[in-house]
Image (spheres, coloured by chain):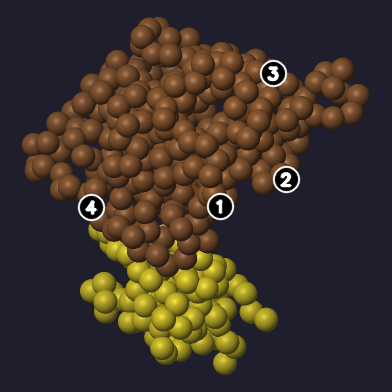
Amino acid sequence: MKLSDFSEPALTRQLAGEGLVLHTGPFSVHVRTTMSSVVQGLSILYRDYDVSHMQGYADFHVQLVAGGGLRRWYKPQVRFLFDGFAPFKPLPLDQAFPMFEWGLNWCVANHMHNCLILHAAVVERGGYAVVLPAPPGSGKSTLCAALVTRGWRLLSDELTIVSLDDGTIVPLPRPVGLKNHSIAVMKAFAPHCTVGNETRDTNKGTVAHMRAPRQSVEQALTPARVGWVVFPTYQSGAPARLEKLGKAGAFMRVVQNAFNFNVVGVKGFDVLKGIIDDCACYEFSYGQLEQAMDVFDSLAASRVAEKPAQKTA
Amino acid sequence: MPTSPTNTTLLLWASIPDEVLRWAEWDDQYVVYHEDSGDAHQLNQVAALSLQHLTGQGQVSGDLVRTVAQLLVVDVDDALTATVEQALANLRRIGLVVSIRL
């Protein structure tokens, strides 16, 4: 059953009642809410995802609920509950959907310690993934959003999940988070893409999410092997420039962008060493998305020229 | 307790057990992973050779400088001595070697 099988009124009733289990890549999330903006955000941005009724197990149980007290009437707020516990302070009510997305990221980053989790976007073409580790504000999500409108498969725009068994990337294709200027940039770059409602005055500025391509959602159970690690930086007006990086330095920069490297132990080191051994590492700066697309197309073409990717599923 | 690199000729240096260290090497740049702390550290060639040589045996810095010179096939000079002593100080700071006053 897809989420799009529900009309918005039916979805509203379901989420307000027993809730719905949303399947995003390897995770299942039991969602309950009465917040209309969350219902709307889900119906726009998650329509292609498998959902099921709550029968037994879900990885995460989350609720978006109204804040209590006098604030219900004066500057109402929303709270994110994880297993009935509120890990964050409440936010203004109009930030309910972004809070759902941020809360879900928190769930994955803080609880999935059977994988190495990187703060990185990751896209794939031809069986090889490009991992894009970067701190906030580096243009990572904008680059990722642009790539997935040009035929690259979205594996994740925020959390790269590395299997500790074989070093492949486990897809977690969810809506791509856009901020401030990048919202208009993406709407101009890919007018056909679907961007949800904008939320202003968050602690990240104005935010909106772009729907993940349906094909990426449908391939959410197909892992990919890493072909490249690329550290992106947006520089206004700069020409696209790809520079090879030393592998030891690249290894350390990936570690700096890992959420749980210290937690997963020696397996994380061994897996990351294997990835860095097998892939090319680059620094990438860009000022225009079109030029960036050309660079990434060339990267993909170079792998095709080398050899076909081995089947990893 | 001595801490200055300039005093290291008076010190016996030893590494933590090599069973808790994992190594990666690319183009003479090294990463060492310390299983007990869960931390990874990037090391240059001098630091890596020093640490690897100190596993399982203590050595004073003068002897270690000579060993590193042999491994790198270079002469012992003031620059190499300073580089080794700086590497030892850094390795001690990140908890991969210890020093004992003789």
Q: State the residue at coordinates (53%, 44%).
A: A55
Whether labels 3 and 4 share one chain: yes
On residue A94, which mark appears?
A: 3
> What is the display colour for chain B?
yellow
Q: Earlier in the sequence, mark 4 or mark 2?
A: 2
- State the residue position of label 2: A85
- State the residue position of label 1: A111
> What is the display colour for chain A?
brown
Q: Chain of mark 4?
A: A
- Asked whether, in this view, residue A81 is left or right of residue B13, the answer is right
B67 or A108: nearer the eye? A108
- Which amino acid, mark 4? Asp
Q: Position of residue A248 (x, y in %)?
A: 35, 55
Q: Is residue B59 above or below residue A129?
A: below
- Asked whether, in this view, residue A267 is left or right of residue B101, the answer is left
A40 or A89: nearer the eye? A40
Can you tell which quarter of the image residue B102 is in? bottom right
Q: How many marks?
A: 4
